[in-house]
């Protein structure tokens, strides 16, 4: 029996503590899919029916409080530590060493028993955040959406290293909406042709395959058809962190509001443009997004 209180979208994921080290400076900030997704969805429509389930240590409670004060429905589960990512960049910003200095515990079915939503977006940071059983259980209750990024890395000692995704077929068969960038598409499918790769992913049971190509735009494959979505050039590139999570928020919001695949993709792309133009989480309004869409 479903709860009377059903959200349109529920995001489930860890809010992280991030340390960014460059030759010029060291910065400490909050991060993670759960954070970027939540703020983007709240900014685009503060009245939208949305909830967040997160699991963090006390060091992340300021972020939880900020979200709650803004009006976001946040369920917080306690754990000894928040996920702690350290990113060390050399003079070439493409050269990054990533470490996990602390991990949070996975999400369990018992913790999610009281959630009720039409769409569940999983903010996976590492492959063990959600068991296959938990994902299958959520799929029985609503539409499940993932970004594959978190499934393509594992922690060895403290170092984060890329991995092939051995469980891709068993997991994708339990998922409705999947977002991948070009590199992730190639790792998951072994294919470089986006149309072939999208069809292959859909053959596993995925209803909506979202492929993003940065400044080259994005493509959605759903219902046997392809939808090409242009990228909108930002006035300047300030911060690309969380851009994928912002796209997911915009796309799922658009679909929840009745937009077709292409319309939802364009909304998401415009939100990414605004996100890139300033540091931190997405803070644009629907009016800002419409201005970009209207050129």
Image: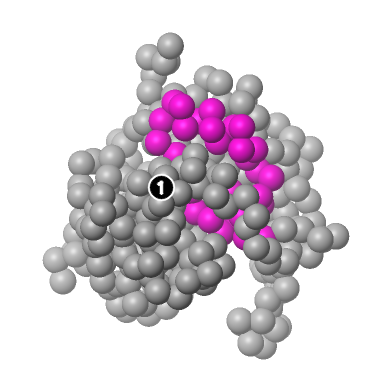
Locate the N terminus by quadrant: top left
Q: Position of residue 264 (x, y in %)?
A: 26, 53
> Looking at the image, which residue sits at the far bottom?
91
Q: Position of residue 11 (x, y in %)?
A: 48, 39
Q: Nearer the viewer, residue 134 or 21?
A: 134
Q: Tell me what residue is drawn at x 45 percent, y 49 percent.
A: 204
> Looking at the image, which residue sits at the far top?
1
Q: Tell me what residue is drawn at x 50 percent, y 36 percent.
A: 52
Q: Quadrant of residue 118?
A: top left
Q: Quadrant of residue 193?
A: bottom left
Viewer can see residue 159: yes
> Looking at the image, which residue sits at the far left?
294
Within 10 Å of disc 1 (Cα), the crowding (few <14, some 14-19, many 20+) is many
Q: Tell me what residue is drawn at x 61 percent, y 32 percent.
A: 133
Q: Secondary structure at mark 1?
A: loop
Q: Position of residue 7 (x, y in %)?
A: 38, 28
Can you say whether 228 is above or below 286 in the image?
below
Q: Nearer the viewer, residue 260 or 164?
A: 164
Stretch in magenta: 124-153
5 to the left or right of 154: left
Q: Nearer the viewer, residue 285 or 51?
A: 51
293 to the left or right of 183: left
282 to the left or right of 268: right
Locate the C terminus by quadrant: bottom left
Is residue 143 a member of the stretch shown in magenta?
Answer: yes
Q: Position of residue 104 (x, y in %)?
A: 73, 43
Q: Tell me what residue is drawn at x 24 percent, y 62 percent.
A: 227
Viewer can see residue 68: no
Is residue 215 a member of the stretch shown in magenta?
Answer: no
Q: Which residue is mark 1?
A: 206
């Amino acid at each position: 029996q479903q709860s009377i209180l059903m959200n349109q979208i529920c995001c489930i994921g860890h809010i992280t503590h991030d340390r960014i080290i460059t030759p010029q400076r060291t910065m400490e900030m909050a991060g993670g899919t759960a954070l970027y997704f939540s703020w983007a969805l709240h900014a685009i429509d503060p009245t939208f029916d949305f909830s967040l389930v997160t699991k963090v240590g006390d060091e992340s409670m300021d972020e939880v409080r900020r979200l709650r004060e803004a009006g976001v429905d946040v369920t917080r589960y306690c754990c000894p530590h928040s996920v702690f990512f350290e990113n060390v960049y050399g003079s070439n910003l493409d050269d990054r060493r990533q470490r996990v200095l602390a991990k949070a515990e996975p999400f369990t079915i018992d913790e999610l028993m009281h959630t009720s939503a039409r769409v569940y977006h999983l903010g996976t940071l590492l492959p063990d955040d959600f068991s296959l059983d938990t994902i299958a259980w959520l799929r029985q209750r609503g539409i499940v959406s993932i970004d594959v990024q978190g499934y393509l890395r594992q922690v060895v000692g403290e170092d984060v290293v890329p991995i092939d995704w051995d469980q891709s077929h068993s997991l994708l068969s339990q998922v409705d909406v999947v977002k991948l960038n070009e590199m992730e598409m190639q790792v998951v499918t072994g294919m470089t042709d986006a149309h072939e790769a999208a069809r292959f992913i859909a053959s596993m049971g995925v209803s909506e395959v979202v492929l993003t190509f940065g400044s080259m735009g994005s493509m959605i494959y759903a219902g046997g058809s392809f939808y090409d979505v242009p990228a909108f050039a930002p006035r300047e590139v300030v911060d690309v962190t969380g851009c994928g999570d912002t796209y997911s928020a915009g796309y799922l919001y658009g679909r929840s509001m009745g937009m077709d695949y292409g319309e939802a993709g364009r909304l998401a792309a415009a939100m990414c443009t605004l996100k890139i133009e300033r540091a931190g989480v997405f803070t644009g309004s629907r009016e800002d997004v419409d201005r970009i869409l209207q050129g």
